[in-house]
Image: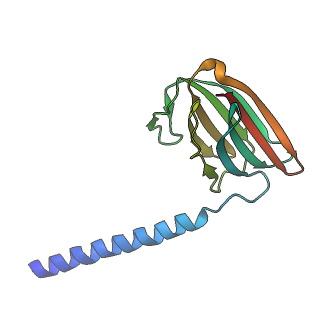
Amino acid sequence: MRIAMLKNKFFTILAACAALLVFFSFSTAQVQKCTEDGSITRVTKSSSGKFELVTFEVLSDSPDYKVSNAHRPFSEYGSEKPLYIKGNYFKSIVFRGINWTCEIVEKLSAKTSTIMAVKNIEQFEGQVNYIIGYRTKAKFVSTTSRGTGKARKITLKFKK
């Protein structure tokens, strides 16, 4: 009797593990790199001369975005899990009408002294929101949009 109960528990656990493996395989297989029109293909952080930059590469001839000041507390969209983002001041950049179901490539490893953090806090239902944390209020310079056709680069510029 006891051996039969142990066998049942073992097979139940085995079936649950197999179901999780199948679910995980499907969920990761659905996430693809962003290559469709209306996608943010890449986000980079860089340093050039007297400036530090955060650049968003967007496959759209006229991306709908808004840059504004942001303030703590920050939370992860959906779970409302509190997020700590390094910085004393913050800029939010929100893109609307974006293909949000793909994986945005992030190249944020460049060493910067003013830009302290770049964090995606929302990517859902056509909207993507990034928060940029930086050291000093007077360091933010401007936002520019450049490019031709379907390839645009939106750049936030900070003084070193």
Q: Residue at x 79, y 38 (%)?
A: 64
- The quadrant of the picture occupied by the C terminus is top right
Horizontal side of residue 20 vs 70, given as left or right: left
> Considering only vertical position in the picture, is 11 above or below 56?
below
Residue sitting at x 61%, y 50%: 106
25 sits left or right of 61 in the view = left
Displayed quadrant of residue 114: top right
Which percent across, then down, holds residue 55? 71, 42
**Residue 61 spot, x, y in % from top left:** 86, 46
**Picture coordinates of residue 63, whole percent (x, y):** 80, 42
Residue occupying the far left of the picture: 2
Q: Quadrant of residue 29?
A: bottom right
Residue drawn at point x = 66 percent, y = 60 percent: 33
Quadrant of the frame with the N terminus: bottom left
Most extreme residue toward the front is 49
Extreme residue toward the right, this view: 149
Above or below, 158 against 76 in this view is above
What residue lies at 78% left-to-right and 44% top-to-bottom?
153
Number of numbered labels in the structure image: 0
Left or right: 150 with respect to 34?
A: right
- The image's colour scheme reads rainbow
The quadrant where residue 37 appears: bottom right
Q: Position of residue 135 (x, y in %)?
A: 56, 25
- Looking at the image, is 1 positioned above or below residue 85? below
Observer-nearest residue: 12 or 146? 146
